[in-house]
Image: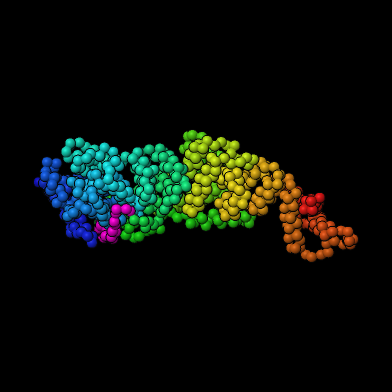
């Protein structure tokens, strides 16, 4: 007698009930199910339990029976796909029980006037991270079983069969994995998605939900990631001004970074963000959806391995509700702002701590440059940009600690490399978007000069950089060092002065030391440029402002330097014991300036320990007097 194994699944929904479906895996057991039950029976592989009917049987009987499939994949998912018999073909209803998630979704697709042409039933196909629901000639649904929470991550197409490569028109028998048997011809097919069709659809569709689903589908199922990323970047660049209900740049960076290291371990879906979108309330045209909670499968395991171990981990995750496992950069945001604040006040914590953070950034940038075989034409990664390096280093440090806490069985070195790959991937994607735009508009390094008007190409690149900045700021993602300098240079060339200052004051453009230094050196002292330079200088942080003022040989700059020098001297004087500073009588012809200069001279000559405070800028009372007289002369027009 053939070996038998008895299993049962209890599935209940408000629309249909399959009470304790009991099945036995042997060659003689036969139930009237159109599709097979494909379930993992051992750690070594899959055993096919065939409940299908032969291709010689009467096809008219198929519509009398329900369709049931059980699918698993290597990430520990367990899905039961169920379609009842149809009393009418005006609409098709099917349910997917995500047993590894603890809920089910019942989909109803309206066929409309095409229902009279339906001659075949639904086919469920297992495509690893997706389950395809296929009704020939009417619809093709691609359900995301790895991240099924939001309906926008699943794809719902109507009226075509082009999503699949070489999909036969006849009835199909699903075999192990993605193999299919064409009942009519007896040929075997391997189910695979048509990448060219999916990319073309990404350009053509008007539905935001389809764009979102297609983007994720292309990244997760593609065989050539670099080519597919380049195509998506091209789509983003061509539609940079379009309005969507999600941010394509954000979604691309998060999703592509996620899939770049996902194969390293199956737990990444719980530890790293999969999407920038947290909620989706927009309905899918022609699809109605009902979501219901279902009891989790009861597993009694002692030494589960491989698939069963991963399934058990998924069930434990849902059972004990651990939504906070996902990496959150709120700690990075808080620590980064703290370090920047300390830098402004000159009170920074231990040098070893900051050095370790900056060393992390150096490793990420080195890892990025090592993987990039072609030289870049964009002038990025060529300056220190300490603020962005701090942000990169902090992200590496926090992400490494996060993964070490939750990936107990993974070696520390492997986790460190995964973190470096993930962080460098984010920076690389931003560089790729800029690189594509730079090459498209045929820009050259001489764009980093202020003494020329911006071209239409430079304005287009500036617009793309602004969109990238908006996308990364809301998620608090790092930017490649040099990004803000390049953005600032293009902003000065592209924007009128009042718009430029508005961008600076609102934080869109950052005044980096490199950009402002070039501005002071490139521009002459025409009236227009003087106004620009002065507007920039008064907005600089104090430490950078002291350096930049000395690069501008102009009475206005001398006036600013003098004011700061006087302010520091008098502030120092207030802290000293009060005494008679000047024992002289001034005649009436001495203006207030004379008294101020005498006071400053006395402070400078009697200071104790003040030399280290003021000596570095080569400014003294005589310099202040000359600057004041020049400024007065300029104001009087003499």
> For the view shown, which residue lies furthest in the top direction?
374
Taking depth in this image into account, of 107 and 383 the one nearest to the observer is: 107
Q: Residue at x 66, y 48 (%)?
A: 532
Picture layout, residue 515 above or below residue 635: above
Residue 416 placement (x, y as % from top left): 45, 46
> For the view shown, which residue lies furthest in the bottom direction?
578
Asked if residue 141 lies left or right of residue 623, the reply is left
Location of residue 150 (image quadrant): bottom left
Task: Residue 268: say if magenta.
Answer: no
**Residue 482 visible at all:** no
> For the view shown, which residue lies furthest in the front direction?
113
Taking depth in this image into account, of 63 and 180 the one nearest to the observer is: 63
Q: Which residues are magenta?
A: 284-299
Asked if residue 87 lies left or right of residue 158, the reply is left
**Number of numbered markers:** 0
Rendering colour mode: rainbow
Q: Residue at x 48, y 42 (%)?
A: 433
Q: Residue at x 48, y 44 (%)?
A: 430
Residue 188 placement (x, y as % from top left): 21, 37
Residue 189 placement (x, y as % from top left): 24, 38
Q: Residue at x 15, y 51 (%)?
A: 65
Picture layout, residue 609 above or below residue 306: below
Taking depth in this image into account, of 242 and 188 the one nearest to the observer is: 242
Location of residue 453 (image quadrant): top right
Residue 256 placement (x, y as % from top left): 41, 45
Task: Residue 290: say if magenta.
Answer: yes
Asked if residue 478 lies left or right of residue 286, the reply is right
**Residue 337 visible at all:** yes
């Amino acid at each position: 007698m053939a070996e038998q194994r008895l299993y049962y699944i209890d599935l209940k929904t408000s629309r249909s009930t399959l009470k304790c479906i009991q099945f036995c895996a042997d060659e003689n057991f036969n139930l009237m199910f159109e599709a097979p039950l494909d379930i993992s029976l051992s750690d070594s592989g899959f055993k096919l339990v065939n409940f299908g009917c032969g291709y010689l049987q009467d096809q008219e009987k198929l519509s009398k029976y329900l369709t049931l499939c059980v699918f698993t994949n290597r990430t520990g998912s367990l899905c039961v796909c169920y379609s009842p018999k149809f009393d009418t073909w005006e609409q098709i209803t099917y349910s997917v029980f995500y047993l590894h998630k603890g809920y089910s979704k019942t989909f109803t697709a309206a066929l409309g006037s095409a229902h009279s042409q339906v001659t075949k039933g639904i086919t469920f196909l297992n495509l690893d991270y997706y389950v395809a629901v296929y009704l020939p000639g009417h619809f093709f649904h691609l359900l995301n079983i790895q991240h099924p929470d939001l309906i926008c991550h699943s794809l719902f197409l109507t009226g075509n069969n082009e999503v699949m490569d070489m999909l036969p028109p006849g009835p199909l028998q699903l075999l192990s994995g993605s193999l299919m048997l064409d009942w009519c011809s007896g040929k075997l097919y391997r189910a695979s998605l048509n990448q060219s069709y999916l990319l073309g659809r990404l350009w053509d569709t008007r539905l935001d939900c389809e764009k979102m689903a297609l983007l994720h589908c292309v990244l997760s199922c593609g065989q050539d990631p670099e080519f597919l990323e380049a195509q998506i970047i091209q789509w983003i660049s061509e539609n940079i001004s379009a309005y969507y209900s999600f941010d394509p740049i954000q979604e691309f960076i998060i999703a592509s970074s996620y899939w770049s290291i996902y194969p390293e371990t199956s737990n990444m879906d719980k530890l790293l963000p999969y999407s920038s979108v947290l909620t989706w309330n927009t309905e899918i045209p022609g699809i109605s959806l009902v979501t219901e909670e279902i009891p989790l499968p009861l597993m009694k395991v002692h030494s589960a391995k491989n698939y069963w171990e991963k399934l058990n981990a998924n069930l434990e995750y849902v059972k004990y509700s651990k939504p906070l496992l996902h990496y959150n950069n709120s700690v990075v945001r808080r620590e980064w702002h703290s370090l920047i604040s300390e830098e402004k006040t000159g009170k920074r914590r231990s040098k070893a701590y900051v050095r370790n953070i900056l060393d992390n950034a150096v490793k990420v940038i080195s890892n990025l440059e090592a993987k990039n075989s072609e030289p870049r034409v964009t002038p990025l990664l060529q300056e220190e940009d300490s603020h962005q390096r701090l942000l990169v280093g902090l992200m590496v440090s926090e992400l490494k600690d996060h993964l070490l806490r939750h990936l107990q069985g993974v070696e520390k070195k492997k986790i460190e490399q995964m973190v470096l790959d993930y962080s460098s991937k984010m920076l690389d994607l931003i560089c790729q978007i800029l690189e594509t735009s730079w090459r498209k508009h045929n820009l050259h390094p001489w764009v980093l000069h202020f003494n020329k008007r911006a071209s239409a190409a430079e304005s287009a690149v500036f617009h793309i950089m602004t969109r990238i900045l908006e996308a990364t700021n809301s998620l608090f993602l790092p930017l490649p060092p040099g990004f803000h300098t390049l953005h600032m240079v293009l902003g000065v060339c592209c924007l009128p002065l009042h718009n430029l200052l508005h961008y600076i004051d609102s934080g869109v453009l950052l005044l980096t030391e490199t950009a402002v230094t070039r501005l002071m050196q490139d521009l002459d002292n025409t009236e227009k440029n003087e106004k620009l330079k002065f507007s920039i200088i008064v907005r600089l942080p104090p430490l950078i402002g002291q350096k930049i003022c000395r690069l501008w040989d102009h009475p206005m700059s001398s006036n600013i330097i003098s004011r700061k020098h006087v302010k520091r001297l008098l502030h120092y004087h207030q802290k000293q014991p009060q005494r008679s500073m000047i024992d002289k009588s001034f005649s009436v012809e001495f203006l207030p300036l004379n008294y101020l200069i005498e006071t400053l001279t006395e402070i400078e000559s009697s200071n104790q320990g003040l030399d280290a405070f003021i000596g570095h800028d080569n400014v003294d009372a005589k310099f202040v007097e000359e600057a004041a007289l020049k400024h007065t002369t300029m104001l009087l027009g003499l």
